Image (spheres, rainbow, N blue to C red):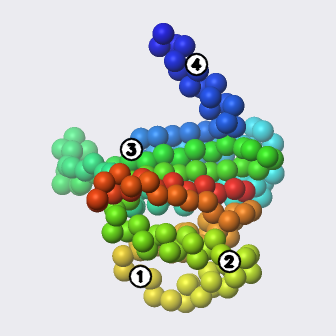
């Protein structure tokens, strides 16, 4: 029964065009390893170098957003590692696949309800912009002092929009009064 269940799960992923998927707790080390595997997989498939760079860049930005902003985190000190160093892992998922001749990168994680309106506004603004407007907005934001709460997310979202071949898709699903499940899809 176990093998049938996971074979069915794998077949479902394959039918949806999923070539790569990770769900769980992330760190910079995991990001590096997953990114390396992604690049190797795309190189083996002789994917256009420009496309590989765009997919990889969006993957990294999305994974970093999970690491920085996921409201689902675990942390603590581990004496066997560096003494006194706090370890923090952020939960989320990243899925990469292909459909209609394009790659897509989907990330998802839990966000705080207080952060949802600001994130929604930023993404809606980017959705309304064409490529030239996104480019101008990017240059404008580089000149601005960063929002102290953003930890780079404004530029990161613009970077993602710059590489996307169509407007970013996103959605929020309320979990409770304090949190939402956030999902973003980018096509390359």
Mark 3 or 2, closer to the camera: 2
Q: Label 4 vs label 2: CA separation?
A: 42 Å
**Residue 49 falls in image quadrant:** bottom right
Q: Nearer the viewer, residue 22 or 8?
A: 8
Residue 30: where, in percent of width, then height? Answer: 46, 45
Q: Secondary structure at mark 2?
A: loop
Q: Label 3 vs label 1: CA separation?
A: 27 Å
Q: Earlier in the sequence, mark 2 or mark 1?
A: 2
Mark 2 or 1, closer to the camera: 2
Q: Earlier in the sequence, mark 3 or mark 1?
A: 3
Q: Earlier in the sequence, mark 4 or mark 2?
A: 4
Q: Label 3 vs label 2: CA separation?
A: 33 Å
In this view, the residue farthest toward the top is: 1
Q: Which residue bears the numbered disc 3? A: 25
In the image: residue 41, left or right of residue 95? right
Q: Earlier in the sequence, mark 4 or mark 3?
A: 4
Q: Which residue bears the numbered disc 4? A: 7
Q: Secondary structure at mark 4?
A: helix
Q: Label 4 vs label 3: CA separation?
A: 24 Å
Residue 107: where, in percent of width, then height? Answer: 53, 52
Mark 4 or 3, closer to the camera: 4
């Amino acid at each position: 029964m176990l093998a049938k269940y996971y074979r069915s799960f794998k077949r479902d992923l394959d039918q949806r065009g999923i070539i790569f998927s990770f769900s769980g707790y992330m760190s910079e080390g995991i990001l590096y390893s997953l990114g390396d595997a992604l690049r190797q997989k795309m190189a083996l498939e002789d994917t256009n170098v420009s496309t590989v760079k765009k997919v990889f860049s969006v993957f990294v930005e999305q994974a970093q957003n999970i690491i920085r902003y996921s409201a689902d985190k675990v942390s603590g000190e581990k004496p066997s590692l560096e003494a006194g160093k706090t370890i923090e892992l952020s939960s989320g998922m990243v899925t990469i696949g292909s459909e209609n001749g394009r790659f897509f990168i989907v990330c998802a994680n839990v966000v705080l309800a207080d952060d949802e309106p600001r994130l929604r506004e930023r993404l809606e603004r980017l959705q309304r912009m064409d490529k030239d407007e996104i480019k101008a907005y990017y240059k404008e934001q580089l000149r601005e002092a960063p929002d102290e709460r953003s930890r780079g997310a404004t530029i990161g979202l613009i970077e993602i929009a710059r590489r996307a071949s169509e407007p970013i898709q996103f959605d929020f699903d309320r979990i409770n009064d304090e949190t939402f499940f956030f999902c973003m899809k980018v096509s390359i």
